[in-house]
Image (spheres, rainbow, N blue to C red):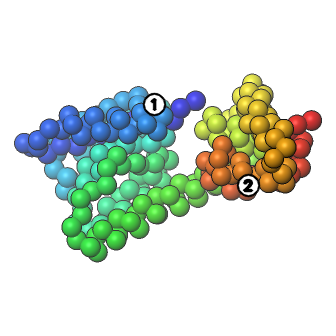
Amino acid sequence: MRIKAVVYSRVSTGEQNPKAQLEVVLQYAQERGYEVVKILEEQTSGSTDPLERPVFKELLKFVKENNIGVIILYDLTRFYRAASPTQALNKLRQIMDEYEVFFEFAREPEIEDPLFREFWMFVKSWFASYERLQTSLRTKYGLMRLKKEGRLYHRPSVVHYYAAWLYDKDFSELTKEELESAKKQLVKIVKKYWDNPAVKKTKIGELLKQNELREMYIRFPKAPDSYFTWRILQN
């Protein structure tokens, strides 16, 4: 299941070639495997608070009602030309917290001011850390809910983690069919290393972390990775 995305394009009066910016954003979404389900365009000043823009408010309503995972814009200036970078960051954080959605930008803004350029690097780093934290919290509370409902009696296996990553779901949302499909795929991935006499079985976890399962372990750093994890899969 692909992550659902919406595209927001803000243009100012008389701005040149907004279609070119939209093409860049759509290409960005395609390269990352996002499913773009809606495109909204708005003609307004960048200094206007996003929460006071009619189209942007329509976008947030759509995000909340349709389980949208990411909002994609051309660059940070399309979101908000605030009085200060901190103000723009706080606005992003407010929306991400309230609507449980992530922002991505297809292009980095052209920044001449060295201090603001350094700030932008901090923002990008903050985005990555924030996304990992939110994922960790959703996983933690999902497990707590399952245990409370009596539907989970053990720690999740590597199959649970792989399925949650593969289908972009919490553990509580996974179906039996998805778990079975994920297990089959995971067994095939591991088998390639397990059956290779040139590969030490104790090193399989490291190889998977560097290659096929790299993104899974970035999202779930506490997922099982020991020798016994892979041995059980082969039985």
| In the rendered image, the vertical position of residue 213 relative to residue 191, given as above or below | below
Q: Position of residue 200 (x, y in %)?
A: 84, 51
Q: Position of residue 52 (x, y in %)?
A: 25, 49
Q: Nearer the viewer, residue 73 or 27?
A: 27
**Which element type, helix, strand or loop, lies under badge 1?**
strand
Identify residue type, mark 1. Answer: Glu
**Residue 141 relative to residue 27: left or right:** right
**Residue 105 relative to residue 187: left or right:** left
**Which element type, helix, strand or loop, lies under badge 2?**
helix
Q: Residue furthest right?
A: 235
Q: Which residue is mark 2?
A: 206
| In the rendered image, the vertical position of residue 168 relative to residue 130, given as above or below | above
Q: Position of residue 134 (x, y in %)?
A: 57, 54
**Residue 160 relative to residue 18: left or right:** right
**Residue 22 relative to residue 187: left or right:** left
Q: Which residue is mark 1?
A: 35
Screen quadrant of the C terminus: top right
Name the residue located 84 percent from the left edge and 38 percent from the top edge: 195
Name the residue located 45 percent from the left edge and 52 percent from the top edge: 96
